[in-house]
Amino acid sequence: MFLELIAVFVAGFVGAGLMMILSALTGRRLPRWSVPVGAGAAMLIAGIASEYSWYSRTAQNLPKGLSIAQTVETSALWRPWTYVYPLTDRFVAVDTASPLKNAETEGLYLVKLYFYGRWRSNQIVQVMVDCAGHRRADPVLGDGSPPLWRDVGPDDPVVKTVCAEV
């Protein structure tokens, strides 16, 4: 986050500098307010570019064995450009490199889900996936009660990713 802040400030200086050069080249015919407007526009563009490139940068740097199962695109009123091109600010990755296979039940796996979010801390959750029944459940916490299964169907992104990879 700190490096992004520095990048935005550098973009502001570059934008102001470009407007100053453009003003000098035109014989000082540009209005005086064009320099701060150029700086602000450059800072805004740098911030927007950083927001939009977060997902691709994070996805490229995932460790081997993590497969992206689902992405979440958002639009917001305070970012009107996201209505034209939605912003991916969250995604779920599945650890398909080391699923734990149930020895007693065929097609039952225990996998880790990694929840990534822009400006959020990452979370790791273990879930059980039943590839034969197209359902998933949180694992048992050790109190002896059976897991609560949810029928999510074969099109569920987590079930689809786990069952395709194992």
Image: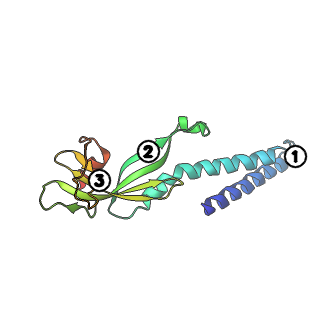
Kindly identify the amino acid type of the residue bearing the numbered disc 1: Gly
Image coordinates for residue 125, horizontal then vertical, percent: 35, 57
Q: Residue at x 24, y 52 (%)?
A: 147
Query: Mark 1 Cα within 10 Å, few/some/many (few <14, many 20+)?
Result: few
Question: Dot 2 corresponds to which residue?
Answer: 72
* Dot 3: element: loop
Question: In what quadrant of the picture does the N terminus appear?
Answer: bottom right
Q: Nearer the viewer, mark 1 or mark 2?
A: 2
Q: Nearer the viewer, mark 2 or mark 3?
A: 3
Question: Dot 3 corresponds to which residue?
Answer: 138
Spatial separation of the CA atoms under disc 1 and disc 2: 49 Å
Q: Residue at x 83, y 44 (%)?
A: 33
Labels 3 and 1: the sequence-earlier one: 1
Q: Nearer the viewer, residue 30 or 146?
A: 146
Labels 2 and 3: the sequence-earlier one: 2
Q: Residue at x 26, y 59 (%)?
A: 143
Image coordinates for residue 164, horizontal then vertical, percent: 23, 51
Q: Nearer the viewer, mark 3 or mark 1?
A: 3
* Dot 2: element: strand
Question: Dot 1 corresponds to which residue?
Answer: 27
Image coordinates for residue 42, horizontal then vertical, percent: 69, 49
Q: Quadrant of residue 106?
A: bottom left
Seen in the image, is 47 located left or right of residue 13? left
